[in-house]
Amino acid sequence: MTHNGRTGRRALVVGLGIAGIATALRLRQVGWEPVLVERAAGRRSGGYFIMLFGTGVASARRLGVLDAIGDRSAANLTMHEVDRAGRRRPGMSPAALPGRPRQLLRGDIEQGLFAALPDDVEIRYRTVPDAIVQDDAGVDVTLRDTATGAAVTERFDLVVGADGMRSTVRALAFGPQEYLHPLNYMIAATVLDEPVEGFARHEGLVLAEPGRSVWTFPFADHAPGLLFSYRTADIDAEFARPPVASVRAAFGPSPPGPSWRACCGVSSRRRSSCSTPFTRSGCRAGIAAASSSWATPPGA
């Protein structure tokens, strides 16, 4: 359902990722006036592998962006289970999963959503919330421009925190984030410029060992996504060094073998990658707080 009129209700959405853009788009469709704020200087591009299952497909269709998001899957995409010696055996292909989920890059979804935003939706970059005060009638939010330091307090009917796992909105609204419980697992993800050596573009691989794994996810029309997951005893230490150095340490000291060496080689040539810890969280009722990360394996 699309509401063509304005309700006069104003919403602040913090975070310009998938969750934030989708929230602003839907609010605008039903007559709200959303204001999007983003800490970064601009909208990011690119992103890692995502599988869009039935619920996600239905949501994209309801938002009117399913065609814009696209589909990078194909019937010939295959997966191999490998070991460090390079031995292969057939693995579970995403194309064979029930419902035939769409294989995408995160950037595909963000771009499709962003392109659908009406021109009258206000977006403020380099802007963060510094204070949130809620009463029975609405919410007063102090917003700060990180480039100039200027701050302004504005009135909203709704505040949505879509600013990630370590949400500023959560912290301001609910206090210390004691509901985050580290599971002592790390993710490092990137998108490659070329297939892993020894594998065709349509072939992916899984190298799974106790406490650690490597995945490459193939696409029909793009080089694969690459994902490392591993257990760690000290999450903070993982962020004290470059992601590639942390990954190398996590997968040692065993001899690398051809499969691991090839994955690490292509990842080290990437100019950018991201790392994030696995956590589970809980949140009290109140101001909405949401995030689209990390819900990937076994399927986002």
Image: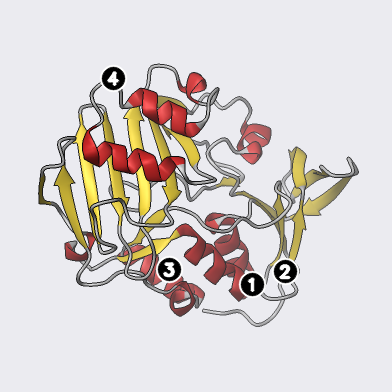
Residues at marks 2 and 1, CA–CA distance in whole angstroms? 7 Å
- Frontmost of labels 4 and 3 is 4
Instruction: Give the mark nearer the N terminus: 4 vs 3.
Output: 3
- Residue 201 lies, with reference to residue 139, above or below; the image says below
Residue at 55% x, 63% y is 22
Label 2 sits on residue: 121
Alpha-carbon neighbours of circle 4 within 10 Å: few (<14), some, or many (≥20)?
few
Numbered tag placed on residue 253 in the rendering: 4
User: Which amino acid lies under the numbered mark 1 shown in the image of this protein?
Assistant: Leu
Indicate which disc, 3 or 1, sits on the residue closer to the N terminus.
3
Q: Left or right: 195 with respect to 206? A: right
Q: Amino acid at mark 2?
A: Val
The percent coordinates of residue 179 (x first, y second) are 49, 28
Q: What x and y, as percent, mark residue 57?
A: 37, 69
Q: Amino acid at mark 4?
A: Pro
Q: Secondary structure at mark 1?
A: loop
Crowding near the residue tagged with mark 2, few <14, some 14–19, many ≥20 C-alpha atoms within 10 Å = some
The numbered dot on residue 59 is: 3
Which residue is identified by label 1?
Answer: 117
Q: CA distance from mark 2 to mark 4?
A: 52 Å
Asked whether residue 273 is in view, the answer is: yes
Could you say where residue 125 lies in the image, as x and y percent from the top left? 75, 54
